[in-house]
Amino acid sequence: MRWAVLALLGLSLLLGGCGAASTRRVDPALTMAPTGFQTEVNHWPTPENRDLEFMQVYDPWEPMNRHLYDFNAGLDTYVLLPAVNVYQAVLPKPVRKGLSNVIQNLNELPVLFNCILQGKGEKSAITTSRFLINSTFGVFGLMDVASGAERLKVQEEDVGQTLGYWGMGNGPYFVMPAFGPSNLRDTVGFGADFLLLYLEMKQVYRMIGVKETWSVAITEMVIRSLNRRANVPFRYHETGSPFEYELVRFVYTKKRELDIQR
């Protein structure tokens, strides 16, 4: 989940950093050193960031969120990225691709559940078709055969989107420890997504005769996390923009609004 949205930030952040540098004098106190992991609270509006007012998001917990953002930056730099480097060094690219495909195939069932709850018949049919095709012709999901068809592209639905579809508002913006940008509604949805995944994998383990489910589940979650992080190019505090926190917050919020509308 949440790391996927950060893939959209690369161009936006670079343009934001360049725009900030070209249109105003940046206060040195707001500049974020890549190794410092400190983001200053920018109070709205000020003469220096008045043209960024359009990026305002309801963020009453901003001081706490900025500390969590910095915590996530440190965790990412000193734990996740080194682990990803080991993951990529140990497993050849074809093996990593196969694992990614299996994970995506397992994710189809929770997506289908949310498509049904939202009454999205076409998306439900596409997701069902993808799961059946990749589970059979794709050898239990090792190959993503279904994506070769133009009308069978991956669908993305989660509990947060379902709650939004039913009319629940975003609530306050919230930076989830280790997982990144979110809001109150999506944080509740994240917990429900995790429960759905747990119930699904419990049945999978039972079907294949796995008895030591705890150790296997931990291994699976580690692989999921490394696979997800390996496929996201975003890096904390490397944008050159003093407003990285605001940009991440804005892009995440707008993307989730679009996700619910589509």
Image: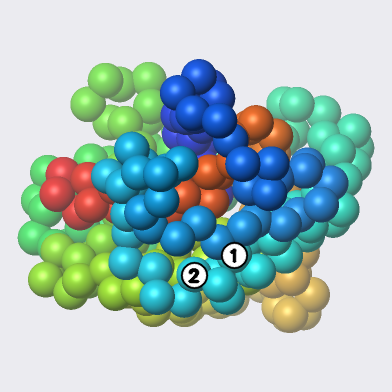
Residue at 49% x, 70% y: name it: 62
* Closer to the camera in the image, 1 or 101: 1
* Image height of 234 relative to 175, above or below: above
Circle on res. 66: 1
Vertical order, 211 against 131 (above or below): below
Q: CA distance from mark 2 to mark 1?
A: 6 Å
Name the amino acid type tagged 1: Arg
Mark 1 closeness class: few <14, some 14–19, many ≥20 residues within 10 Å? many
Left or right: 152 in relation to 10: left
Between 201 and 6, the one nearer to me in the picture: 6
- The correct choice, above or below, for 60 with respect to 148 in the image is below
Dots 2 and 1: beta carbons under 8 Å?
Answer: yes
Q: Residue at x 38, y 27 (%)?
A: 147
x, y percentage for residue 257?
Answer: 23, 52
- Residue 256 in sight in this render: yes
The colour scheme used to paint the residues is rainbow
Q: Amino acid at mark 2?
A: Glu
Q: Is residue 222 visible?
A: no
**Tag shown at residue 62:** 2
Query: In the rendering, at what x and y percent does residue 216 appear?
Result: 75, 69
